Image (cartoon, rainbow, N blue to C red):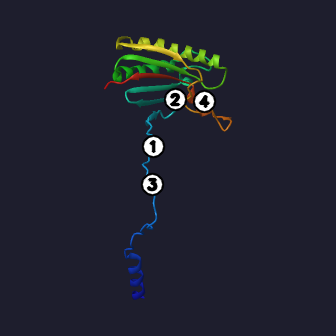
Amino acid sequence: MFRSLSVALAVVLSPTPAPSAPADATGVIEDLVLPVEDIVGEVESMDGTESESKQDRQVTVAVTSDVLFALDKWQLTGEAKERLAKVAGKVKAEGAGGVVKIEGHTDDQGTDAYNRTLSQKRAQAVEEVMRGLLAPAGVTLQAQGYGESRPKLPNMVDGEPVEGNRAKNRRVEIVFTAKQ
């Protein structure tokens, strides 16, 4: 039994020569060139109502509209003002000054015109509060509503609405440049 085991191990463990290419084999060696895309990490709050991403020095803080506003409204809630105070603190502590963009977004429900108007009014409401919170910070605020034109996630998947995605698409983003 030991003899057959040692023969089997010798066969299995013995080196085998690498296969050689046939003499008439020819081929072209090509370099693979693949695109490299930027990786943008995003940190999301446990409840999914706020996220932050950074690409180079550009920081984007997104707060879902469900936290900031009542349905189809642009008046900020009490909770919104608390949330925006935290975002303003981040802009003051980490921002390099300059332009701070406030971008309003909606989901795909409603007409394009309605959504553009609603997102613009929401961006302006956030701008007004942030102006007071960032007054001594030396920044210029710019509010812009994009309606449903820049979804974060697809509103529909396989022809079916995805409510979780729609909720994340209803948001206001505060975009600023971080210090070096």
- Residue mark closest to the camera, 3 vs 4: 3
Q: Amino acid at mark 1?
A: Leu
Dot 2: what SS? loop
Q: Which badge, 4 or 1, is on the more N-terminal residue?
A: 1
Q: Amino acid at mark 4?
A: Arg
- Residue mark closest to the camera, 2 vs 3: 3
Disc 2 target residue:
49
- Residue mark closest to the camera, 2 vs 1: 1
Screen quadrant of the C terminus:
top left
Which disc number belongs to residue 93? none
CA separation in Å, label 3 and label 1: 18 Å
Q: Amino acid at mark 3?
A: Val
Q: Which badge, 2 or 3, is on the more N-terminal residue?
A: 3
- Circle 4/circle 1 CB separation < 8 Å: no
Screen quadrant of the N terminus:
bottom left
Dot 1: what SS? loop
Q: Amino acid at mark 2?
A: Thr
Q: Which badge, 3 or 1, is on the more N-terminal residue?
A: 3
CA separation in Å, label 2 and label 1: 36 Å
CA separation in Å, label 4 and label 2: 12 Å
Which percent across, then down, holds residue 137? Answer: 35, 14
Front residue of 107/11: it is 11
Quadrant assignment, res 70: top right
Front residue of 16/170: it is 16
